[in-house]
Amino acid sequence: EVILPPHLRRRVETHLGQYISQKPKDIDAFSRSSSNCSIATDEGLFEQPELLPPSKVAIEKIIWRKSQQMQEEQLIWQQSPEGREMMEFRSSLPAYMEKDAILSAILQNQVVIISGETGCGKTTQIPQFILESEINSNRGAMCNIICTQPRRISAMSISERISAERGEKLGDTVGYKVRLEGMKGRDTHLLFCTTGILLRRLLADRNLKGVTHIIVDEIHERGMNEDFLLIILKDLLPRRPELRLILMSATLDAELFSSYFGGAPKVYIPGFTYPVRTHFLENILERTGYQLTQYNQIDDYGMEKMWKMSRQAPRKRKSQLVSAVEEACKAADFKDYSAQTRESLSCWNPDCLGFNLIEYLLCYICENERPGAVLVFLTGWEDLSSLKDKLQGHPLVGDTSRVLLLACHGSMASEEQKLIFNKPEDGIRKIVLATNIAETSITINDVVFVIDCGKAKETSYDALNNTPCLLPSWISKVSAQQRRGRAGRVQPGECYHIYPRCVYDAFADYQLPEILRTPLQSLCLQIKSLKLGTISEFLSRALQSPEYLAVQNAIEYLKIIGALDETENLTVLGRYLTMLPMEPKHGKMLILGAILNCLDPMLSVVAALNVRDPFLTPMDKKDLAEAAKAQFSHDYSDHLALVRAFEGWKVADRDLAGYEYCWKNFLNPAIYNTWSYDEHLLRAIICYGLYPGICSVVHNEKTFLLKTMEDGQVLLCYNSVNARDSRIPYPWLVFNEKIKVNSVFLRDSTAVSDSVLVLFGGGISEGDMDGHLKMLGGYLEFYMEPATAKLYQSLKREFEEFIQTK
Ligand code: CDP
Ligand code: MG
């Protein structure tokens, strides 16, 4: 709009030459006052310090014009038939009634806490209220709202929903960004992202320049990333007085957050939900006529699960629950049940008992109840898929002309997701099997019936032994209420908790925050990379600070792997590791893999370790599955088995089309055989990454024992390739993960030799060869067999000489 005088044009061109020549259309205006200038573009303001501050008038003009445009577009949409329908839906949500109160609280306070029933419209409406109010006050083109979500799937589905509510394409005004995927454009003013993405952005931009509002959603879940982000934001607020922070939470406990932010005001959205009738096990039996003796007809799957679960249940809680169940049985006069021995009561486990009961309940609902979708809460993906398999063969529930059976979990594809929100055709009942993702972050509107198994998979962390544990454990009271509430969205609903009331009474009120129940290594590394000061001092400012020992373990680990030096500063390796969005041990494998020119197989290993186990073991085809896996397993390494399997897949994938191509072109398909890596080298890199996750292999006559320094004897997970062979021809295993169930189990291990361990274990930095040797010595001496001891001594001498000559 403004034509540049020639002398200025030259100056600007030399400065921003590249920018202008690449994107001439991007420049909306150019302003000047005397010899000072700046350029405002769609992407923001390009201030040139040498050319002095921009003319406010010009910028305001652009912003005003764009905001006007946004406003007009919305008006047109809202007057269209679809738009009107959307507005009708939106204004029926409880959040809409509180719109003014919310906006004025945000205007007057830097931090506001908003809580309300799930489904009342927090996630979809509040970011929109802010956006609309900015647009209506002609600041639309300037605002930059970021809303974080704990899960990818909600960032994606919510942004899509809001775009639809605004009659726009996803990626226009509203977009999303999650790891490896995103939809956002130059005009995106409201961005949904995972909390992890915002944390990474802070790495590059500590003050979040240009961001006007940050909304942290689902804070009641107390995820580690969210707790971490809150500490950082609390520090940032005084530096950015204009920035607004909005915390959103589904249930209660708003007071905790309010006092953390110096008494920030709370806005509560009174929700409207229809009453939900609650049935505990006692009532279910009465209501549905389910015979308790059917518990005894446990299928194979249930048997195995029951056995496993009974060994997994933490001892203290178990006894508590056993007596609770006994009480309940007595009170309800469950003759069959109370006749069972205490031994079998200790196997009380809603998952396995529940599989039969859930099937029965689903039939009962389909046959006797009014229309409405059913939502079933299960512990995790594994349970979900096995129940789905089981139900698909059922004459009623598996009949696709009567039932639409869907699964809802964190890693499902977006196509699948849409089916979950859609209303099925008349006469078809939708049944959704879900993990606790459907508890608060996803709302399925037409649910009328909820079946709650009472458990969720939760990690915990044993700081004393430095061991993570993963157990399906009882949910909290708040979670159970939350699950129940899902049934009353559109009409009065029913909730079936498939456990006795007294078990519910024994639930904890709230769930423990993640920061108190997970290893902290990645978090500590992030604290260092964001230059947030001393790790323990920083963490002491958390909403609830982790245990001293947990923090020390994490710091110690980072020192051992060479990411931090003695004074807790990042090493060069540490700096690289912070740039890789993965656990440090996996980052190390990639870095060394790249250096030693075998990045490709290492990527396969790391990718596979970060998703679910690609090797399936269906219950009915166990032998076949094991035989198939055995083809890949002759290296005494689960990791190399992964690489081989993946390489094989690549060949097979190409072969489908490639074979025909070869046939036509008279090429030899055998050229596709790509396995050409040096297996020993890969083993060394894996060791470099996984150290100090090592255990010694002690052979006796028939088999071997495994020992680690912290745990003593450990076992291998049943599906490890090393669990099948009684002779491992190496003295060590390096492992990706250990997990305490009843004993400590190692997942994914690779066998390595002494020399590989000595040369590749730990991060040997030049300055700290001594420390490294001392520590390595500690490990070796602990396990030392005479031959190893000798080798170690001679290597140590060699190293020491080497250091002296240097
Ligand atoms: O965040 P909160 O739990 O308070 O509610 P929300 O996610 O904003 O959802 C508000 C309403 O929008 C609910 O009735 C949802 O069912 C509906 N919604 C939808 O129809 N489709 C989506 N993809 C997301 C939400
Ligand atoms: Mg929400």
Image (tube, helix red, strand yellow):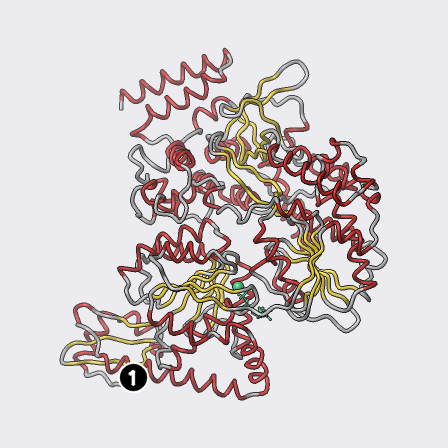
Q: Is residue 683 above or below residue 799?
A: below
Dot 1 amino acid type: Lys
Secondary element under disc 1, as helix, strand or loop, is helix
Among the 4 quarters of the image, the one containing residue 436: bottom right
Q: Is residue 603 left or right of residue 298?
A: left
Q: Is residue 715 above or below residue 145?
A: above
Residue under label 1, please give it: 61
Q: Is residue 406 left or right of residue 556?
A: right
Total residue callouts = 1
What residue is at 49 percent from the left and 25 percent from the top? 710
Q: Is residue 40 above or below residue 673?
A: below
Give the percent coordinates (x, y) of residue 43: 35, 72
The reply to whether residue 663 is visible in this rendering is: no
Residue nearest the viewer, comparing 197 with 677? 197
Give the percent coordinates (x, y) of residue 668: 67, 47
Give the percent coordinates (x, y) of residue 408: 65, 58
Among the 4 quarters of the image, the one containing residue 21: bottom left
What residue is at 78 percent from the left and 57 percent from the top? 362
Among the 4 quarters of the image, the one containing residue 244: bottom left
The reply to whether residue 223 is visible in this rendering is: yes
